Image (cartoon, coloured by chain):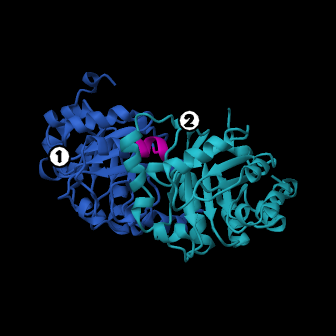
Chain colours: A cyan, B blue
Amino acid sequence: MIVDIRKWKHVFKLDPDRDISDEALDLICQSGTDAIMVGGSTGVTFDNTVDLMARIRQYELPCVLEISNQEAIVPGFDLFFIPVVLNAEDPNWIVGQHHEALKEYGSLLNWDEIVAEGYVILNGEAAAAKLTKARVNLDAKDVAAYARMADKLFNMPIVYLEYSGVFGDMELVRRTRQVLENARLFYGGGIDCLAKAQQAAEVADTIVVGNIIYSDLEQALRTVNVNFDRTGR
Amino acid sequence: MIVDIRKWKHVFKLDPDRDISDEALDLICQSGTDAIMVGGSTGVTFDNTVDLMARIRQYELPCVLEISNQEAIVPGFDLFFIPVVLNAEDPNWIVGQHHEALKEYGSLLNWDEIVAEGYVILNGEAAAAKLTKARVNLDAKDVAAYARMADKLFNMPIVYLEYSGVFGDMELVRRTRQVLENARLFYGGGIDCLAKAQQAAEVADTIVVGNIIYSDLEQALRTVNVNFDRTGR
């Protein structure tokens, strides 16, 4: 399958550590979303990742693994997203784990399948923020500087603003999007209805819908109906 | 001036914090080296950097600033090298200072002049290693993993193995060079005579000669005569 992330507008993110019924997974995969991203901050293992992948692979849409730990690297996804947490204070989440993984698997990798994500974690209450010791007290200029670093200094194809658990500052997202030349802006966090999906779609390139899948599937499915024509991209 | 770092085989590195006479600078700049790199770990200021640049600019060879601190960013160089110290334990030297500089100057930069260097500092006694809290206890596999990270994950044009003060492990340098697909391998450290320059030139793409300029200019100038044809590149 040829996978072009530049065409993605809407993505569902599934957590291998959370249960989803076959019926719910069927609705998610047939919803018209552009891709499924598999990933989570805690409790992600090889076994629960391979199980979830096998179930998603029964559908034709692109399926990506966002790697959060070396033990849960499962072959067979279309792409592998590698988060580089630019605002982490623990270097383990910027380069450390990546170094360990490259030392182990570096010579075996197909780099065409690997996509670096310049991550900025913006909700200090999120598990990911605590895990990475993220500097979350950032204004729009701070975030724009991280975005430029990812886009221009590191040539990363994705800048990912992650508010996981809360709906973010859309003005900050809009200003971040404006400084990007090549990278695509992914937005994730707090999209729990079509109206919020629409707001996020108007400032980001790609919106990621996650948690609401597990608490209100019907609202989650409605987010696919976001009108990207209104965004002018 | 169009500057193509891919053609550089030999570079002299001058430290703005150290004195060099006009006569010595003239011999360095007319030596046939491919470029002058300006940079240092300590004592680098705007004033001493601009002074040195003005003197080098009387010659026609390419002149690059390797940025080590935000206060010493002087316009007017052909290129600006940005070290990203991949084995630093202090994230300030991986992304922190870069973030501060991009916050300040991000919208003004001409990115065509900016080159990210994936640095690996390998001599624990060097000032740069102490400053950055570099993890120096690395074997060839560790260094190869950092090199792949710079080359493939971050798309950096340069991987820089820095042994400053001592002559490095040429077998480790050779093995690092082998894993690179696009990045150029710069080697620096302990090149104090033509024989060592030759050894380094046989395993690296570009050799950097620094300290010896200040202690034995004649030996330094001889390193330009390294025979790159023997390297097969």
In x, y percent, where is residue B70?
A: 42, 67
Q: For mark 2, does the 10 Å Cα neighbourhood hold few (<14), some (14 to 19), or many (20 or more) residues?
A: few
Q: For mark 1, does the 10 Å Cα neighbourhood hold few (<14), some (14 to 19), or many (20 or more) residues?
A: many
Is residue B148 highlighted in magenta?
yes
Helix, strand or loop for the magenta stretch, by majority = helix
Tell me the residue at 21%/35% (across/down). B171
In x, y percent, where is residue A143?
A: 59, 67
Give amino acid for label 2: Asp
Q: Is residue A231 left or right of residue A181?
A: right
Q: Is residue A200 left or right of residue B65?
A: right
Tell me the residue at 66%/43% (across/down). A55
Q: Work out whether residue A94 can be spotted.
A: yes
Give amino acid for label 1: Gly
Q: Quadrant of the N terminus of chain A?
A: top right
Magenta residues (range): B147-156
Identify the secondary structure beneath mark 2.
helix
How much space separates mark 1 and mark 2, taking CA atoms?
A: 38 Å
The residue identified by callout 1 is: B190
Q: Chain of mark 2?
A: A
Q: Is residue B114 left or right of residue B93?
A: right
Q: Viewer-proximal residue, B70 or A204? A: A204
Q: Work out whether residue B115 can be spotted.
A: no
Identify the secondary structure beneath mark 1.
loop
Tell me the residue at 27%/27% (across/down). B228
In x, y percent, where is residue A56?
A: 68, 43
